Image (cartoon, rainbow, N blue to C red):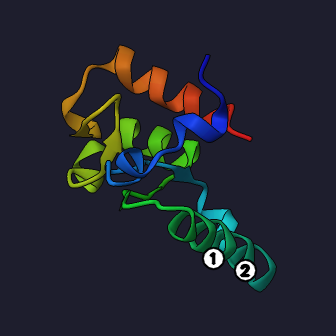
Amino acid sequence: MATPSTIHTTSHRKQPRNLSPTFNPSWVRDPEHRAKVKGFLRGYIENGGTVLQINMIDADTLRETQKNPANYKHLLVRVTGYNAYFTSIGKELQDEIIARETHQI
C-alpha cells in the first residue's frame, strides 16, 4: 500500500507542479497581505513548484466587464485548464466565473 512518503519519489519530483491560483487584488494592497502572498509563493517554489500562473481579479471587475465589455476586451480569466478572454465567453460561463470569484476564501 502506498503511503505519502512512498508516493513522493524522486521520479515524481521531476514532474511539473502546476498551480493557477486566483488572488483578489485586495490581497496585495497592504504590506501585511503582500508578505503573506510572498510567503505563499516562496513556499510553493521551495516545495518543488515549477509552473505558476497567477490570476489577479475580483468579482466586481468581472461584473463591470459584463456591463462595459469594450473597456475590458483584453481581460483574461482562468476557465478550467485554459485561459479565455472574458468578453468572448458566453454569459452563462461568465456568471459561473463571477460566482467562483465571489465565493473564494
Q: Do the residues labelled 1 and 2 touch (CB within 8 Å)?
A: yes
- Residue appearing at x 59%, y 23% in the figure: 2
30 to 101, vertically: above or below: below
In the depicted structure, whether residue 80 falls above or below residue 93: below
CA–CA distance in space, label 1 to label 2: 5 Å
Quadrant placement of the C terminus: top right
Picture residue at 34% right of the left edge, 19% below the top = 91
Q: In which quarter of the image is residue 33?
A: bottom right
Residue 18 can be seen, yes or no: no
- In this figure, which residue is indicated by the disc labeled 2? 35
Residue 68 drawn at (x, y percent): 33, 44
* Amino acid tagged 2: Ala
Find residue 38 and name its label: 1
User: For the point 43% across and 58% down, which residue is it?
Assistant: 54
Report the side of 69 relative to 6 (left or right): left
In terms of depth relative to the viewer, which is nearer, 9 or 90? 9
In this view of the protein, which residue sits in the foreground, 33 or 57? 33
User: Between 15 and 29, which is closer to the camera in this rendering?
Assistant: 15
User: Is residue 36 in sight in this rendering?
Assistant: yes
Q: Where is residue 92 in the image (x, y as percent from the top left)?
A: 37, 14
